[in-house]
Image (tube, rainbow, N blue to C red):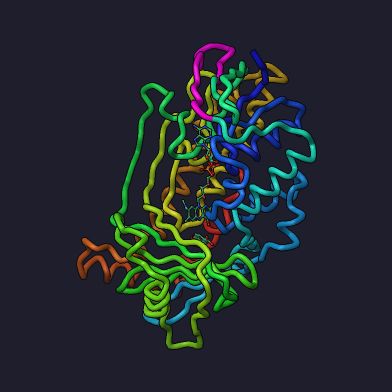
Amino acid sequence: MARTQVGIIGAGPAGLLLSYLLHAEGIDAVVLEARSREYVERRVRAGVCEHPTVELLREIGVGARMDAEGLPHHGFSLRFDGEDHRIALSELTGKTIMVYGQQEIVKDLIAAHEAKGYPVEFEVSDVELSGLDSESPRVSYRDADGVARALECDVIAGCDGFHGVSRPSIPDVKVFNREYPFAWLGVLARTPPSHEELIYTHHERGFALHSMRSPEITRLYLQVPHDEKIDEWPDDRIWSELSARLVTSGEFSLREGPILDKSVTPMRSFVAEPMQYGRLFLAGDAAHIVPPTGAKGMNLAVADVRVLSRALVDLLQHKRSELAESYSDTCLKRVWRAEHFSWYMTSMLHTDPDGDDFQRRLQLSQLRYTASSKAAATSLAENYVGLPFE
Ligand code: RFL
Ligand code: PHB
């Protein structure tokens, strides 16, 4: 049977970054991924990297393309009552964020693995975990050719996202869950952004978000009902709904272009506690989900694996278990801060189909306060750019 120190399930941002951090410290790891390399490199998801994420990617030497092609942002707009209210991130916090697609980070990490010869196996299937409460847990799986394999490890890292096999392997896990009565329809369009910065729009027809990926590519989102079918949204309906929600008395006209990608994402908040069982450690979406309004999901995955890599270096190289034992408690503090922030952004900006006029007045009051009070704007900004790592 093959052996490695850390068996990592999933080649998303969490799994790839963990593997890279561990190898850099001389710890052996193997990443097992269900999908193909092309699939994970093309999956359109997050776009906003927090300040601590950007710094970490630079520090470990995988930030060069991000610095060359990413778009540093100093602020964003809250648009409501047809007007823009700028949240000046860098003036309020001294920090910026970077707009750089998650799949670009994934590509950069895969390329870095390839360059150094660190193993990532794509298109594996039938992944099963066993012996989690022993000192040599195992992963059994089929490789891309369908051949049955097994990997004996010192530790398994479950970085396999919300629908993975790792979390269900933990007995008696406590789950906190909230589903929202809406989803996001996300589109990627070949057209220059209509504004230099992101615009988070509160409108009675529903939330809309203007974002981007590059000077030529725009990323846009619309709040839609939670069970919405993508077929209900031909391209011309998407553009006319975006125009209706993004209206403003200021200068703005939405630039339309060919739609390259379209998907519907349900919105939920979810936390599994604890994030560890025996020699299995969960990280990223495998352990928690936030609605995307706060742009926190990928950044939380990064924060988890930073803590986990340090804990595993201590455990496997120095035989010290304190950091491993406190892994879940350490991560959950940041996780719950991000859960609260993401819930707050979501509740302030979306139109609740079951809400009443009282609730709508409260939302507007919160938006006006955030836009007009330096204290309120600073609180939003410091959460948005990312609180320092612990
Ligand atoms: P991932 O990226 O889901 O990766 C998990 C990987 O595990 C694989 N896998 C398995 N492999 C082997 N065996 C199995 N049994 C397996 N089961 C699953 C999967 O194929 C996959 O490759 O989780 P990870 O690494 O924890 O990363 C989390 C992020 O992907 C996620 O939080 C973000 O995309 C969330 N998110 C955003 N986060 C931000 O920080 N900023 C944003 O601006 C932002 N915007 C978004 C988002 C997510 C969105 N969607 C589509 C969910 C916008 C959207 C629309
Ligand atoms: C994105 O560009 O995909 C994006 C930006 C901000 C968010 C969520 C997603 O809050």
Location of the N terminus (image quadrant) = top right
Residue at 39 percent across and 21 percent down: it is: 171
Residue at 44 percent across and 58 percent down: it is: 263
In this rendering, position of residue 378 left or right of residue 203: right
Count of marks placed on residues: 0
Which quadrant of the view contains residue 228?
bottom left
Q: Is residue 350 magenta?
A: no
Q: Is residue 137 magenta?
A: yes
In this rendering, position of residue 340 left or right of residue 1: left
The one nearer the camera, 223 or 127, is 127
The one nearer the camera, 200 or 263, is 263
Q: Residue 344 location, x and y as percent?
A: 39, 57
State which region is magenta: 125-139
Q: Residue 226 location, x and y as percent?
A: 31, 56
Q: In this rendering, does residue 341 appear at all? A: yes
Above or below for 255 versus 45:
below
The one nearer the camera, 247 or 117, is 117
Q: Residue 355 location, x and y as percent?
A: 22, 63
In this rendering, position of residue 220 left or right of residue 110: left
Above or below for 171 versus 197:
above
Q: Residue 230 location, x and y as percent?
A: 37, 60
List the single residue furthest toward the front: 145
Residue at 61 percent across and 32 percent down: it is: 308
Q: In this rendering, does residue 378 appear at all? A: no
Location of the C terminus (image quadrant) = top right
Residue at 53 percent across and 69 percent down: it is: 189
